[in-house]
């Protein structure tokens, strides 16, 4: 099965886990590097692989860069649960907003997609790419290699997509930029989290460091989840600042992360 987020880039608020209210996009080194790399890939009309652990900000950084660089030329697909080339064909058909019904025969379908992808330059984003097998990556290569198509392709996913691509020289040799994401370091957490959300702006560095060590582990997604519980707890307990008793209350909700 395949779950697709068709077409255009989502609003910036949707990039944050749980669509966390008041969360801010922080100009981390990884985010700025992503913008530079995607600009390079767009100029070269090439392919790129962005990979790393879940919750490390890959999708957020890619979406942010494309909103700045090419919002009207980007078409985004989110793949799940072992998509096949057939799934990718149908996903592209919908993401590109093609009219009529999808062709039944693969060769006709491919010709339709190649014709559409030759009309103007487009950036195709394949999110959750760790779910793809070799034949699915090969299908993307087939589209990109065709002399008619005018595209750049960005794969974003976990280490699985990196491993599949690196194992296959024909695929790996076509990736123009490889970018690895990692969890935030201690120094990055102390610099980033007070800016990430207003509830942490006046929290002591020691408490932020403790929360990261015990529960967040340098993950933006974990921090968003914890922050949502903190906001809820502050409202229920009529608090104006984050303190240790509140953090322990939050821990009772998340059960370890």
Image (cartoon, rainbow, N blue to C red):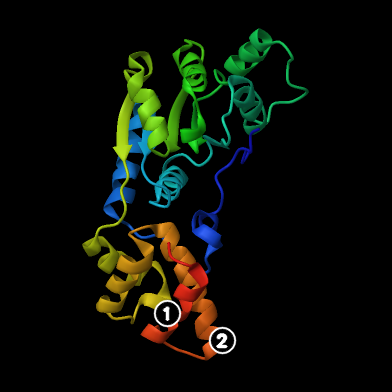
Helix, strand or loop at mark 2: helix
What residue do we see at 52% from left, 81% from top? 233
- Location of residue 232 in the rendering, given as x and y in whole percent from the top left corner: 54, 78
| 165 or 58: nearer the viewer | 165
Please give the count of numbered marks on the rendered protein: 2
Q: Quadrant of residue 211?
A: bottom left
The relative height of residue 191 versus residue 68 in the rendered view (above or below) is below
- According to the image, label 1 marks what residue? 248
What residue do we see at 63% from left, 26% from top? 87
| 31 or 205: nearer the viewer | 205
User: Going from the N terminus, do you reach mark 1 or mark 2 first?
Assistant: 2
- Location of residue 192 in the rendering, given as x and y in whole percent from the top left corner: 31, 65
Picture quarter with the N terminus: top right
Kindly tell me whether residue 23 is visible in this rendering. Answer: no
- In front: label 1 or label 2: 1
- Location of residue 52 in the rendering, given as x and y in whole percent from the top left corner: 36, 42
What residue do we see at 29% from left, 64% from top? 189
- According to the image, label 2 marks what residue? 236
Picture quarter with the C terminus: bottom left
Quote the CA–CA distance across marks 1 and 2. Answer: 15 Å
- Location of residue 199 in the rendering, given as x and y in whole percent from the top left corner: 42, 78
The relative height of residue 77 versus residue 238 in the rendered view (above or below) is above
For residue 146, side relative to residue 94 (left or right): left
Kindly tell me whether residue 194 is visible in this rendering. Answer: yes
| Extreme-right residue of the structure | 100
The circle on residue 185 is: none
The relative height of residue 27 versus residue 205 in the rendered view (above or below) is above
| Extreme-bottom residue of the structure | 238
Q: Quadrant of residue 79?
A: top right
For residue 1, side relative to residue 33 (left or right): right
Helix, strand or loop at mark 1: helix
What residue do we see at 44% from left, 13% from top? 145
């Amino acid at each position: 099965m395949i779950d697709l987020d068709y077409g255009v880039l989502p609003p910036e608020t949707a990039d944050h886990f749980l669509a966390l209210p008041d969360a801010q996009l922080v100009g981390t080194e990884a985010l700025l590097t992503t913008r530079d790399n995607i600009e390079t890939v767009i100029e070269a009309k090439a392919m790129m692989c962005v990979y790393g652990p879940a919750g490390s900000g890959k999708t957020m950084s890619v979406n942010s860069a494309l909103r700045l660089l090419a919002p009207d030329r980007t078409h985004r697909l989110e793949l799940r649960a072992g998509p096949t080339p057939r799934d990718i064909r149908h996903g592209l058909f919908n993401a590109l907003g093609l009219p009529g019904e999808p062709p039944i025969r693969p060769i006709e379908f491919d010709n339709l997609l190649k014709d559409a992808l030759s009309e103007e330059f487009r950036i195709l984003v394949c999110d959750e790419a760790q779910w793809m097998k070799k034949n699915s990556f090969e299908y993307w290569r087939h589209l990109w290699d065709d002399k008619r198509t005018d595209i750049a392709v960005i794969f974003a996913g976990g280490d699985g997509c990196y491993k599949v691509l690196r194992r296959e020289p024909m695929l790996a040799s076509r990736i123009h930029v490889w970018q690895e994401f990692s969890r935030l370091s201690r120094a990055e957490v102390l610099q980033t989290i007070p800016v990430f959300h207003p509830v942490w702006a006046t929290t002591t560095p020691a408490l932020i460091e403790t929360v990261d060590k015990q529960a967040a582990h340098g993950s933006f997604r974990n921090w968003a989840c914890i922050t949502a519980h903190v906001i809820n707890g502050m409202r229920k307990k009529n608090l104006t600042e984050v303190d240790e008793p509140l953090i322990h209350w939050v821990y009772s909700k998340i059960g370890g992360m």
